[in-house]
Image (spheres, helix red, strand yellow):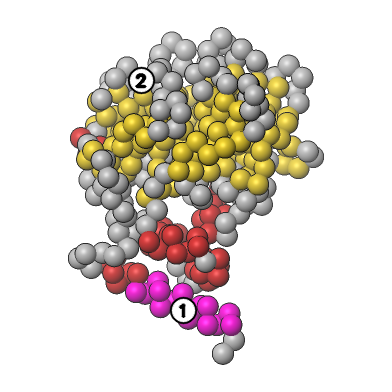
Amino acid sequence: MNRSLVFVVTTTLLVGLGSILIASPGNLFAPPTIPGAREELHRAKIVDLKGAVGPESLAFDPKGEGPYTGVADGRILKWEGDALGWTEFATTVSNRKECVRPLAPEMEHVCGRPLGLRFEKKTGNLYIADAYFGLQVVGPSGGLATPVVTEVEGQPLRFTNDMDIDEAEDVIYFTDTSTVYQRRQFMVAFLSNDRTGRLLKYDKTTKEVTVLLQGLAFANGVALSKDSSFLVVSETTTCRVLRYWLRGPSAGKVDVFAELPGFTDNVRRNSEGEFWVGLHAKKGPLARLALSYPWLSKSLLKLPLSFKQLHSLFVGGIPHATAIKLSEDGRVLEVLEDSEGKTLLFISEVEEKDGKLWIGSVLTPFLGIYDL
């Protein structure tokens, strides 16, 4: 029998078996439990987006207003409180006549897809990592953002993801998830174990971009340490957070900051210098198998599975939410969960402010607020 046919047949059987087990009591493909986790996130309050989907990143302006969030139709929205709700603040493209559906992945390259958001405190400018249109900026009054970085080393950015700003040094650190795949192909990038992700540095004074790290497996969230001596960078496929040293005897070197039980998304530092990491999902048995055996991942991509079906298999058939707090040296301090997805699911970012956690998800039409 042809080898590729054997792979497809084997994969089909595995997927079929996985689907049966996922739907059965005692699901063997269920997401793993995390020792010491607190089952608390189901208590979160929900804030509906009303006509929008996918609040990937959350940011508060220098006045403390917001949060602001980017959504799947390309807009950046601002939360004006319960009385006024959400208002449109900015966009990354001017021609939006076709950008009318809350969720249309096939239109992202036209409408834009704002991911990571960061305010510059001294100016009030909002910097936006648009997956398709690169690093952009918009003033305190909002409106149409303008490009800052759209290409690196003569090649267009394909999957700009997240950033952090060092205002003392006047530089922006940002990630490019892949030089091959775009955001709407993220499951392909993930399953193919693409390792073309990069950590980049933009010098606002010289306008130069420097590649600090390359060869990353789905480069994602970025956050500066409190003393700006290092950066932490989320590497989603490997379920790791890396540390890139900016200062001191290890400057320019990288090490593993934390290895976590799931697929790491954005990382945000709190006022104490600790880091909140959102897990898109915990790493279940089927995901572990697929990422350990490249032929299995490639065969899965050849099967007639929708994104929803493939995603469900990888998360063990159980939508869930996990947030992890790390110390300044990478120790796990706290794990908060909604392991059955009663209220929250598939966390992309956790922003701590004034005793609350504001929680975003790239896949939901709402965000959550959890009281600490």
Q: Residue at x 56, y 9 (%)?
A: 122
Q: Secondary structure at mark 2?
A: strand
The answer to which of marks 1 and 2 sits earlier in the sequence is 1
Q: Which mark is residue 10?
A: 1
Q: Amino acid at mark 1?
A: Thr
- Where, by quadrant of the figure, is residue 173 drawn? top right
Residue 343 visible: no
Q: Along the line of sight, which residue is nearer the eye, 163 or 283?
A: 283
Q: Looking at the magenta stretch, what is its main secondary structure? A: helix
- Where, by quadrant of the figure, is residue 211 drawn? top right
Q: Looking at this view, name the residue that lies furthest to the right.
A: 154
Indicate the position of residue 289 as horizontal and vertical percent values.
45, 64
The C terminus - image quarter = top left
Q: Is residue 256 left or right of residue 271?
A: right
Q: Looking at this view, name the residue that lies furthest to the bottom.
A: 1
Of circles 1 and 2, which is in front? 1
Q: Marks 1 and 2, how far apart in space?
A: 49 Å
Circle 1 Cα neighbour tier, 10 Å, few/some/many (<14 / 14–19 / ≥20) = some
Q: Is residue 302 left or right of residue 325?
A: right
Residue 261: within the magenta? no
Residue 6: within the magenta? yes
Query: Bounds of the magenta span?
Result: 3-17
Indicate the position of residue 311 as horizontal and vertical percent values.
41, 58
Residue 152 vertical placement versus 298 (above, below): above
Q: Secondary structure at mark 1?
A: helix
Residue 10 vertical placement versus 244 (above, below): below
Circle 2 Cα neighbour tier, 10 Å, few/some/many (<14 / 14–19 / ≥20) = some
Residue 272 vertical placement versus 334 (above, below): above
Q: Which mark is residue 239?
A: none
Q: Which mark is residue 353?
A: 2
Q: Along the line of sight, which residue is nearer the eye, 96 or 338?
A: 338
